[in-house]
Image (cartoon, rainbow, N blue to C red):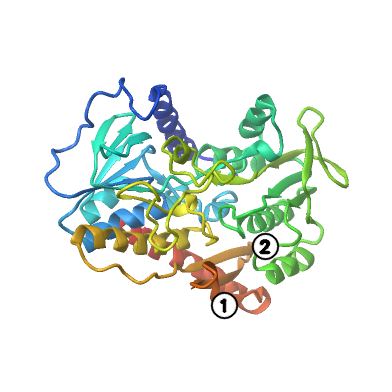
Amino acid sequence: MSISRRDLLALSALGVASASLEAATPSPSKGSSYPSIDFDAQLPKKKATRVVVVGGGWSGLSIAKNIRAYSPQAEVILVEQRSHFMSCPVSNLWLVDEVSLEYLTHDYFQAARSYGYTYFQATAIDVDKAKQILYTSNGKIAYDYLVLSPGIEYDYSKWTSDPVLEQRLRREYPAGFIPGSEHITLKNKLKNFKGGNFILTVPSGNYRCLPAPYERACIIAAYFRQKKIKGKVILFDANPDITIKAAGFHSAFKEIHKEYIEYVPSAAITGIDLDAKVISTEFDEYEFADAALYPPVRGASILEKMGLARDAKNKQEAYIDELTYEAKGAKNIFIAGDARPMGFSKSGNTANTEGQYVASIVATHINNTPQLKWEPPTTLCFSVVDTKPSKAIYVLTQYSYDHASETFDFAGTVYDEDWHHTGAKNAASIIDWADSLYADMFGDSH
């Protein structure tokens, strides 16, 4: 397995674009005004109701597309700092060359052309909620409605308070759940791995894509087996058991990857010595040859800067009406995707279907039509448990809302974890699933 020069250049572009935008971000002054950003973004003059969507992930793309569908008279601007899109779903297969990089990467301009909105490459910095102005690294944008879907950030605070160690963890052992350079690093780790313990971690809480760390363990174990590498995946799970599709993953660990996966539940990390290459838990110490360490996740910190986080204790989550996604205490602002506080899966399919509902809610404001009844998102998630030949399991679920207790729960959940009999069929469905969602977001077949 090797990473082509073309792949390296393409993925490097993602990192360069992001880094250059971050470098251009000025330091904030007191309050939410930015005197150094005293120029308007280079956009056509506002002629209609303007909706600005921040974040070009699975949620933001769905929202931008569907607002135009529900309110074609509106002007929609998608603000995204990356130059092109790379999919996190299906990327585990790219790590072992089961899909190409071209399959995962998509064109923001294509999406904008397909659905009649504007893609504006910039980093969102802050908002003046009273004047309804979004500050970005490339100028100010006035809005009538603002939809924030800024994704996740990693939270290493439960592992360490040492900023030097945190930066080393980010640089040397990135999690690989924010697409881009992290994936290049992880793929190179596998390419160059000679043997020993390869440690992966599963965070607690509602992290991005609940089954993905378990799938990654299976895919890496299959790679070790096929390449005859004398290595073992040690999977530290902060949870007491596998969080989803437990029967399917447990049977795959025991029957397919018995010699290549060691599963360690309730593994709270208490110490990390990167020089000695030792990770400590409450019960033991583990030496490792290499690792990809997935810490707890949180909503983007820009929510705190904008004064849209829940409170001091839950500052990593958006403070919103959980049925309408409207920010509390802030007029005409909506927050969706990974930043929302509800316990829905932080997965691509969930974000895409949730985005359709959020767009319809925004459209009721634009169109001055009655408020819609709450609609649940849908989670359809395939997980590969082996490659060559490929076998997969899946879960399909929606969610319910109890008005009396004001709580959400799963509803109508269907599992297929019998990889022995339906694994090949499920694996064959993954590309069809991804094709349909990519086409939905970008308007092109891939």
Q: Does residue 107 appear to the left or right of 406 in the view shown?
A: left
Q: Does residue 389 appear to the left or right of 45 in the view shown?
A: right
Q: Mark 2 — residue?
A: 243
The percent coordinates of residue 152 (x first, y second) are: 51, 45
Q: Is residue 193 above or below residue 32?
A: below
Q: Mark 1 — residue?
A: 414
Q: Which mark is residue 330?
A: none
The percent coordinates of residue 202 (x first, y second) are: 68, 51
Kind of residue at disc 1: Val
Mark 1 neighbour class, 10 Å CA radius: few under 14, some 14 to 19, many 20 or more? few
For mark 1, give the secondary structure.
strand
Kind of residue at disc 2: Thr
The percent coordinates of residue 51 (x first, y second) are: 25, 49
At horizontal 36% and vertical 38% (from top left) the residue drawn is 83
At horizontal 42% and vertical 63% (from top left) the residue drawn is 323
Q: CA distance from mark 2 to mark 1?
A: 15 Å
At horizontal 41% and vertical 26% (from top left) the residue drawn is 20
At horizontal 35% and vertical 72% (from top left) the residue drawn is 373
